[in-house]
Amino acid sequence: MARWSPLLTWIGLLGLCAAYLQGGLNKLLDYPGAVAEAAHFALPLPPVTAALTIALELGASLLILTGRWRWLGALALAAFTLAASFIANRYWDLPPGHERFMTANAFYEHLGLVGAFLLVAVWDKNHAR
């Protein structure tokens, strides 16, 4: 198992970053759509917010996957995901029903991603010594 460990670790990190790579690339390829999404959530300066989101999603993912400042990339995506969850998955504002149920699921799934990124950051800092 030890000889497979680096490959399995990288595949695991790729899976963890997959949504951010896909999201960043989609926003990059459809920048007007990314700006519209930022405007939809009433974020300030939607064109700037969209550009910063693209840079964060792709840049932090690359830090994690390359191992260069992996801990920093993981902390950045943890903070981004936590903030995005409170902005986009406000299930407590929805009436009971299917939409609230699905939005609550998404909120707690995102909290799981936050936890995973925090574990990656701790793991990386502990193994960098």
Image (cartoon, grey):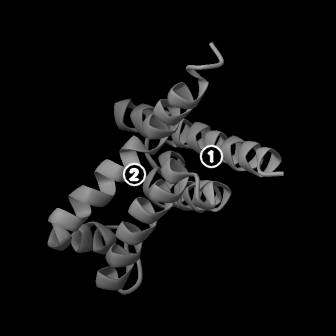
Residue at point 39%, 61% (across, down):
58
Give the residue number, with chain letter if any, for mark 1.
117
The first of marks 1 and 2 along the sequence is 2
Marks 1 and 2 in Cβ contact (< 8 Å)? no
The kind of residue tagged 2 is: Tyr
Residue 88 is labelled as none
Nearest the eye: 50 or 38: 50
User: Count the marks: how many?
Assistant: 2
Above or below, comparing residue 122 to residue 24 in the picture: above
User: Which x, y percent locates residue 42?
Assistant: 37, 75
Residue at point 40%, 33% (across, down):
102
Above or below, comparing residue 39 to residue 107 in the picture: below
Q: Residue furthest front?
A: 3
**Residue 49, picture quadrant:** bottom left
User: Which x, y percent locates residue 80?
Assistant: 54, 61
Q: Is residue 128 left or right of residue 33?
A: right
**Residue 74, picture quadrant:** bottom right
Residue at point 38%, 42% (across, down):
18
Nearest the eye: 13 or 118: 13
The kind of residue tagged 1 is: Phe
Q: Residue furthest top?
A: 1
User: Which x, y percent locates residue 28?
Assistant: 23, 66
Distance from disc 1 to disc 2, alpha carbons, whole Å, reads 12 Å
Nearest the eye: 68 or 39: 68
Residue 20 is labelled as 2
Dot 1: few (<14), some (14–19), or many (≥20) neighbours within 10 Å?
many
Quadrant location, the N terminus:
top right
Q: Secondary structure at mark 2?
A: helix
User: Which x, y percent locates residue 17?
Assistant: 45, 45
